[in-house]
Image (cartoon, rainbow, N blue to C red):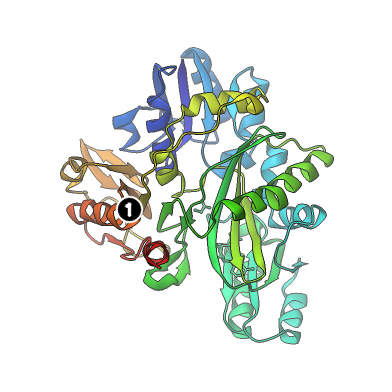
Amino acid sequence: MKVLVIGSGGREHALAWKLGQSPKVSKVYVAPGNAGTALDAENVSIAEKDFPALIDFCKENDVKLVVVGPEAPLSAGAVDAFTEAGLRAFGPSQKAAKLEGSKVFCKEVLNKACVPTARAQVFDNAEDAYRYVDEGDEGGFVVKADGLAAGKGVVVASSKAEAKEAIKQIAEDRAFGDAGARFLIEERLMGQEASVLAITDGHTIVTLQPAQDHKAAYDGDQGPNTGGMGAYCPASLVDDDKLHWIEENVLLPTLITLNRMDTLFKGVLYAGLMMTPQGPRVLEYNARFGDPECQPLLSRLKTDLVDVIEATIDEKLCDIEPLVWDERPAVCVVMASEGYPGSYEKGFPISGLDEAAKLPDVKVFHAGTKLVDGVVTTNGGRVLSVVALGDTVADAKRKAYEAVAKISWQGAWNRTDVADKEIKAVQN
Ligand code: AMP
Ligand code: GLY
């Protein structure tokens, strides 16, 4: 069977690599892909939201399965368009993807489902929001643009002034365009974060092993939020008891509530959680695999992903065997362009990829890369996701950073403390 993956990030490289390992798959295409997917699959130069061209490509090339990676095409109705054209596509419908595409809608669903989450107030103008902040406590606010903003539309404010600056940027300056037409102000929660992803056909959930992302740009969780600067899995912070609690009190009630709202959610339901002293609280839902969490997760998954995806599309997930995992933990370090998550230059040649690829138990997934005259060059903010498996999480970290040390380009940087919290936790 021929498969098309839509997207061009590290997550899509990992998906293409994993799908290509299935004995059922004869060929993987990626649209538009990157320099890494050109090695592990074949790139197709069609934009991720050009659905008519993508559908024509699938029909002309006998593609039997489409896997949509990123939130933007999902929110724009990719799965609906493919399905209407008679193709099999993995991911939520446009209606269901609203769970990620609108933080206001997500909060409504969470509250309806009685799922524990931060208290929040919705605003559509800056004046009311400024007044709300003035009346509240210093340092207790998180300001969130309603719509999609590539992980950058959330500001955790440590003072009223910072909260007001965020409101100004989102609501007045429209830093995120229409995504800021409405926004939320939430109570600030404290605790460690975990990503719990489940594959679901709308009835049954198949929960993946918990992972932890590193959203802040710099070491020690300092600096602005990014799309994610590193990840590891499994995350001991979510032990089996907590995972079951999350399934019963977070994931399943959410699905039931969506079903009652006539919204069948099929695809990846990703709960971004904060483990507070009062228990897990949902910060957000995503409607797709996390990037970079997908990279260490799929590096450890032994089950054929095609079987899980097909069972999801057919609404037969209840029939599949429990997932099989590589016991070894995986650590993923993201290498980024100078200036990211702010503005950055592109087009620097990357060296050392071949040496890194020779290291055992290491896989370098590409994100913002492009082949220019046969040379791999930088083409985005998050450039590479370097994943290593190890006997322990410390060993996986050591191997990942050994590979990172072999790779360079002008201005390359990365966090140096990915997985340190886990290493400390398992030592204690
Ligand atoms: P979100 O896109 O809603 O997950 O927010 C991005 C990041 O902002 C999260 O991963 C957290 O680090 C932080 N964040 C979001 N909501 C809250 C909250 N209510 N309290 C504290 N931090 C938050
Ligand atoms: N790693 C965060 C995200 O995918 O949204």
- Nearer to us in this view, 160 or 275: 275
Q: Say which quarter of the image contains residue 131.
A: bottom right
Q: Where in the figure is residue 82, as x and y percent of width and height?
A: 61, 25
Q: Secondary structure at mark 1?
A: loop
* Image quadrant occupied by the C terminus: bottom left
Q: Where in the figure is residue 214, as x and y percent of width and height?
A: 44, 61
Using the image, determine if residue 242 lies above or below residue 124: above
| Left or right, 42 with reference to 140 | left
| Left or right, 331 with reference to 189 | left
| Left or right, 102 with reference to 31 | right
Can residue 336 be seen from the camera position used here?
no
Q: Say which quarter of the image contains residue 141.
A: bottom right
- Nearer to us in this view, 16 or 305: 305
Quadrant of picture, ligand 1: bottom right
- Nearer to us in this view, 263 or 206: 206
Q: Where in the figure is residue 271, as x and y percent of width and height?
A: 61, 52
Q: How many marks?
A: 1
Using the image, determine if residue 23 lies above or below residue 239: above
Using the image, determine if residue 251 lies above or below residue 127: above
Q: Residue at x 58, y 80 (%)?
A: 162
Can residue 277 be seen from the camera position used here?
yes
Q: Say which quarter of the image contains residue 44.
A: top left
Q: Residue at x 71, y 35 (%)?
A: 202
Residue under label 1: 392
Q: Residue at x 39, y 37 (%)?
A: 13
- Nearer to us in this view, 182 or 211: 211
* Crowd class of label 1 (few under 14; some 14 to 19; many from 20; radius 10 Å): some
